[in-house]
Image: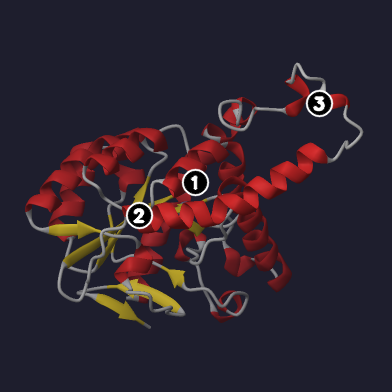
Amino acid sequence: MIATALLAAAACGAGQLATGTGTVQAAPRSDARDGGSAPGASPTGLSEWPYAGLSQMWSKASQALLAPMIAAAEEARGHPVDCRRAKCVALTFDDGPGRYTDALLKQLAAYRARATFFVVGQNAAAYPWILRRTAAAGHEIGNHTWSHPDLTRLSAAGVRSQLARADQAIKAATGIVPRIIRPPYGALNAAVRMQSSRPMVMWSVDTLDWRFRDSAKVARKAVRSVRPGSIILFHDIHPTTVRAMPWVLKSLSKRGYKFVTVSQLFGGATPRLAYSGGGPGIL
Ligand SMILES: [Zn+2]
């Protein structure tokens, strides 16, 4: 199992190369749509009010309110699935958010599918509004570090910093701190594991979408390899992957699969290290 994860790890790395140049550049356009209601624009002259820190206070207060709202939305949208009885599959999308994530969210919504997004902190900071929509739609957000390094090559402090910076960016966007981590490249050793008590989540099916860049191949790989309890690895930074998803969702739905988050798949258990094979497993 570990060998599988490590072999598959190269996938993540190649995917990230594309991310680095592609998604972060769009940052200046960020948040204009739903975070842009700056009090300074008010015709009532509120910007001149003596409490200069008011807007910051409000920002913090609204953030504090956001977390329970997202949690409530998750509950309301949730259709409880017992993965011990149902055929469950966890679709996971790494390295975003990016410019194709919105299209993916629409496809998932069409099938009432929930998925897990292991996001890179610097992309979360670049596309906070997309991450907010992702969380509000009931998907799970995981920590995929700040800048996607091989954590086994970092000092303990370096690992903690990578995780903490990503946590901060995700919390700033969504109000929540991820409960699960996926190390870039699947690169993991005892020293890295010691730096967090949160589960480190790998995968059991690697679509190699970063290599193929071919929607039909990616879909075939996912559909043919899936088993009840599978965790399938995709990267939503590739348009070919996003275009493959309607086929994946349709085929697996027909075969009776329920699309759940990683945490749902493990039924609330908190494994230290999570893989998935023939069924949910804890190592
Ligand atoms: Zn990755």
Q: Quadrant of residue 76?
A: bottom left
Sort mark 3 into few (<14), some (14-19) or many (20+) by Cα contacts within 10 Å.
some
Classify the position of the C terminus by image quarter.
bottom left
Q: Can residue 202 be seen in the rendering of this structure?
A: yes
Q: Secondary structure at mark 1?
A: helix
Question: In the shown orientation, is residue 220 left or right of residue 241?
Answer: left
Residue depicted at 77% across the width and 45% down the height: 57
Q: Which residue position holds label 2?
A: 76
Q: CA distance from mark 2 to mark 1?
A: 34 Å
Residue indicated by mark 3: 46
Chosen colour scheme: secondary structure
Circle 2 or circle 1, nearest the eye: 2
At x 42%, y 68%, the residue is: 201
10 Å crowding of disc 1: few (<14), some (14-19), many (20+): many
Picture coordinates of residue 111, whole percent (x, y): 21, 45
Look at the numbered discs 3 and 2 and tell me whether their residues touch, using CB distance below 8 Å: no
Number of marks in the rendered image: 3
